[in-house]
Image (tube, grey):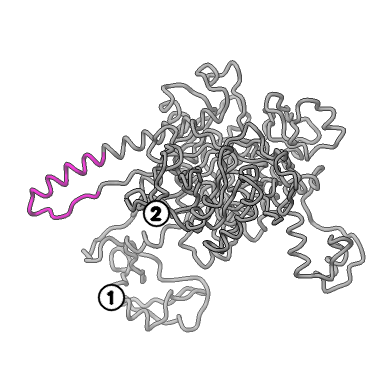
Amino acid sequence: MTELEKIKCSTPDLAEETVKKILAIVPECEGERGTIDFDKLRQTLSSSVIEGNVERYEFTWPGKRAAKAAANVATTKTLRPCVPESVGRDGTPGGFDSQNLYIEGDNLEVLKLLQTCYANQVKMIYIDPPYNTGHDFVYRDRFSLTDAEVQARGGQVNDDGTWNVEHPEINDASAARYHSNWCSMMYPRLKLARNLLSNDGVIFMTIGDDEIANLRKLADEIFGEANFAADFVWNATKSVTNTALVSVSHNYNVVMFKDITYFIEHRADFRLVDDGEGFSNPDNDPRGPWKADPFQVGGWRPNQQYEIVNPNTGVVYHPNSGCSWKNDFDKYQELVKDNRIVFGTTGEGGPQRKRFIWEAQERGKVSKTWWDDVETTTNGTQLLKKLFDGKTFFDNPKPVGLLLRILELGCPRDGIVLDFFSGSATTAHAVIKRNAEDGKSRKFIMVQLPEPCAEDSEAAKAGYENICQIGKERIRRAGKKILDEIAAKNAEVAKENVQGRLALDNPVNPVEKTPPDIGFRVLKLDSSSLNDTSATVGETTQDFTNFDRIKSNRKPEDLLFQLLVETRIPLSDPIAKVKVGGNQVFFVGVSRQDLQDLQDSNSGNPVNSVKQNSAFSAPLCEITNAPLAACLDPKAKLTNEFFIELAKLTPGIAFFRDDAFVDDSARVNVEQVFAQFSPTTSIKVI
């Protein structure tokens, strides 16, 4: 009997994959049973004899080895969609067509799941991790504890190794492992986060004085010291704490590149938008406002040493000692003819070069490391209070203005923005607002542990049970506000266009703005939807009828998202639920434009026998070449006739429930049917 391929029930073993990659490069370093002989590896990487351990500069702490191992431990968790709490891209409650994600659960486990779908895909990461000020430390992992410490904690530690949020530990500053606990918590998360960044990716990490030194050391080790970009010091508050010895008014924003060589070659990709400050047009140059830049640069170059005569005063100028003119003499003459050279603001100084405002805006402006022109935490608090009818739910939330500045640098165009300590969801708010301003289509992924709200808190009194509920509601309200603002502006534009058409001397019509995607899909971390979590691809059983591998309380949608993780398909891809041959089938990965085109079609294809599911898609008349098709309905009947209809749609991967085949003949024939009608389709069962 043909054995159909079954899916894995856990994420890949990252340590095992890394070992394979290393041994592929240096096979002579293989130890017993496929392990690495580190003594051989050290010797291979050195041109001198390695005789043993030597003292060296390194950053370490108690529990570091366990923290490093924690990043490599596979997870058997999954993500389950929560449609009722989701929001459509146009703000429709319960809609599921948004490309944004809000994920509830421990971020260490979620980051492991994201490795399969988003490795090397994230343009920018922003995190505002716990500042380690002695408050509840819910993110401390069991991996950083000894077995004795785990036993001593009793019910405070969950089965998955995370702290029970109902019994958070107080990480008191007097504790011996105060900083070690924080480092052990951060290390595996940053390690996994780096894997998600694209080659042109960048991570911003906001932190206070408590752990700035340790964060820099962690970042240098994980991202590479050479990839350090900057530490932007943000003037976070204008108020003064008179009871303090020193009133702290700043936060740090540590920035690391995935690969600094990319930004060295593409410097304009990490610039602020030039706002035009300091530009003017005193000589009425038809090319527009300009600013005079120095024509002298540091460094002595022989072909850029020549005298320049001020035509207005006759004064002769040479470069200062150790300096050169910015261009050689031939280029200088071209610039003079092009009216690009000026001599001071009054015509009596040394040579300067015109830089027009449109050139500056194309090139962008280099950011300074001191940010005192950005909104403060007071602005963040006031905005949240306004959104939530005057109620205060967070202490010192990050302002949207800070995230807008960070997005301007880190994600100037389309891309995925990840925040795995999302808190009040300021990052999501900023992404939507930025998209509304510049018309781009950035996508966000928010990850947040559902920390309970204190019983006596303002949030609990308002009916919010945990932080996630507040974060999701904040995105809903912020999105609605942004849509309302766009609608109001578009109404004004429409009115101006009517008036413009009536005025013959005003042929230019203002353009209405397109609303951004203000929605999000809610996914929640949970145990695997499969009972047999030890099974691997290729395993089968002869007892098909009694093998209850799928948990009884899991819906087809739950299984679908476990398959998306398994098949490395983005969790935000469009999903259509279509009836094929009498069975409901999910199609995933068809482009949004294709979906719209298909909705507008009326070909009369038999596939169009569809009952619309508002959470997933409008009815489709035809759908072909989807990356994934999955028939996961427990009531489905997998027959030869069904396989023929589905195979004609040529999906990339076809998934079926193992318990839905009508008989053994259908199980055997499925591969033959697809070999005839869609030979490139990969067939798997769950």
Instruction: Assess whether mark 2 and mark 1 are in contact (beta carbons under 8 angstroms).
Output: no
Q: Residues within 10 Å of mark 1 (few under 14, many from 20)?
A: few
Q: Is residue 169 left or right of residue 292?
A: right
Q: Residue at point 89% right, 61% down?
A: 32
**In-image side of 137 versus 258 (left or right):** right
Q: Identify the residue at horizontal 58%, vertical 16% (top origin).
A: 456
Amino acid type of disc 1?
Asp
Residue 333 vertical placement versus 166 (above, below): below
Foreground of the two, 30 or 314: 30
On screen, residue 103 above or below 625: above
Q: Position of residue 654 (x, y in %)?
A: 57, 53
**Chain part drawn in magenta:** 489-511
Residue 484, position as x, y percentages in the image: 32, 35
Badge 2: few (under 14), some or many (20 or more) residues near its Cα, within 10 Å? few
Label at residue 554: none
Residue 497 part of the magenta-drawn span: yes
CA separation in Å, label 1 and label 2 = 50 Å
Q: Amino acid at mark 2?
A: Asp
Question: Which residue in the protein does label 1 denote?
Answer: 338
Q: Nearer the viewer, residue 568 or 532?
A: 532
At a point 32% along the width and 60% down the height, the residue shown is: 357
Which of the 4 image quarters holds residue 206? top right
Residue 12 in picture, x, y percent from top left: 70, 52
Residue toward you, 517 or 456 = 517
Q: Position of residue 410 (x, y in %)?
A: 50, 53
Q: State yes or no: residue 193 in magenta.
A: no
Secondary structure type for disc 1: loop
- Which residue matches tag 2? 594
